[in-house]
Image: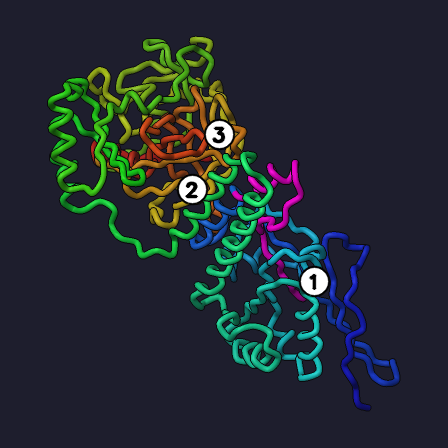
Amino acid sequence: MATSLTEQCFETDESEPTMKKMRLRRKSSSEKEKVETILKATKIIYDYGPPELNLFKYLAEEAHFLWEKENERHRYANEPMNGIVLIHDDDTDIAERCLHYFGFDLRSNNLESADCLLKGQQEVICVFLLRETFWKASNKAYEEILNNVVKKIAKANVFFMVSNEDISRASEFCKRYNVCPPSNVISQAENKKVFYDTFYDILERQMTGFLHDLQARTITEGVTIEEELNGLIEELRARKKTKIPELTAQCLARIKEAKEYGVVGHRLLDNKLFVFVDDPLIMEEDKKTQLERYIEDSFDGTVKITPLRTVLKPHCAIKCGGYVTNNKINKSGTIGIFGKMRNLVNNDIERTVALSSPNLFSDGDIVSLPNGEHVGACCWPVKLEPHRENLIDVSIVEIDSTKIDTIKRAIFNERILVEDIPHEDLDHQLVFKYGAKTQTTYGWIKKISNFELFERDVLVIIPKSPATLFSDEGDSGAIVVTSINKMHYGIGMVFGSHLEPEESSNTSTKIPTVAIFLKNALDRFTSRRQKSICVEEI
């Protein structure tokens, strides 16, 4: 007996309110045989994803905050997207499949109903993630119904993520029904540039539309919002421009030559190059002017010699009350993480140690709890000259074994890895930290290039929420953590903030945090002392 395939429904199953179901039923003419396949549409919101989408995630959340802020007063269209619609035939291992195919870590995700997105006017990315058995069982009539499902989706950019074995079948389907371009059929092993570019293209249209809505509705109202939104749009469009070195080799060489005059680092902001000095003697006007002119000869812009202490404020509360205290200098901060010190010569584990900020403790300093109880002594780094800042080391405190349980810890219960991660993979990456003062906060890593102190790259982190700080006084020493492929990495240590020269054109109201690269600092200790630190859980 012949069977015919007809579309029976495209309905919501009320028993599963978080999933939109599209039912495709195949019936025999006698209604005695029925095979049912269920497609589910789920909105996926991720926190950590592939490095190619770090900038998108950062810009989308920043733009969405501005949109929500204005939407409280006026109703606006062009809401920035904050997820994708995943259409799948089985939801038993969605998290694993999303990580495998896209690099989306759904450990802390939201799975929402996609009903409003499928029927609404917001432009979205819709990905069909169907198992091999789905394609093997399909025929022409079956594909017609699948095509009808695609047509029911409103303003969607459709992609098919398939296995290598199913590429040809899926490509033929998309070509026959003009569902999407052939480049939108991709496998896990293929370059996903078209997929990633679509995220940015949609976001640019939405942000530009939102900006036009603002300009049409307000005259003087909302100028600050427009400026912030314009800045985000410029940052988005900059990714398409050809990337050229912003500082020439000659300019960088001259900055390094100036080390003997007290120069310890630099930061490029727009067309202004800030050169940081850590020696008060350099501030004599004649020497300052000579140095500026010397570096300006190799730089197309303005050079500003800036004392480091005027723009960098260490996060050490000048009072007792943090987790650990240096009573000698009356400063307190945070124990970032505990670990074991191993002697590389005989491979013996020597001591239990704690890591903290180098502006709190140096070799020989006594480490105390806020109540004055001594818990250990610092063995690294060596002491610097007075008025010098240390942004290349971490403090290593040897903890008295009888006192280890008296130290208050952050409860995170995750193993922390300290490994090299390419800087380009960290640009705009979401991070978090646990500090003594502000506890758990989240932020975005700003672009790492063209910012050095003491010949080392420096992390700059801005808070995720404009209403909060990423770190504050008392948080120095907190470990900066991110998640990549479900693994947690300790990438930095909070040092301080306010590293924003007065002449900077930055209009953001968010106060940045400066952090030391943790791997570089620990490697420096290992090379000097022939000992390694194996960090534990936070």
Give the image location of residue 68, x and y in percent.
61, 40
Q: Nearer the viewer, mark 3 or mark 1?
A: 1
**Which comes sooner in the sequence, label 3 or label 1?**
1
Range of the magenta residues?
Answer: 63-89
506 left or right, relative to 391:
right
Give the image location of residue 247, x and y in percent.
22, 44
Mark 1 lies on residue:
40
Q: Are marks 1 and 2 in contact (CB under 8 Å)?
A: no
Q: At 74% from the left edge and 66% from the top edge, which residue is drawn?
A: 22
- Identify the mark at residue 434; answer none if there is no mark: 3
Choose between 491 and 458: the one closer to the eye: 458
Choose between 16 and 119: the one closer to the eye: 119
Choose between 521 and 281: the one closer to the eye: 281
Mark 2 lies on residue:
489
For badge 3, the amino acid type reads Tyr
**Which comes sooner in the sequence, label 1 or label 2?**
1
Q: At 50% from the left edge and 69% from the top edge, which residue is drawn?
A: 187
233 left or right, relative to 376:
right
Give the Cα separation between the discs numbered 2 and 3.
Answer: 14 Å
Give the Cα separation between the discs numbered 3 and 1.
Answer: 38 Å
Q: Residues within 10 Å of mark 2 (few under 14, many from 20)?
A: many
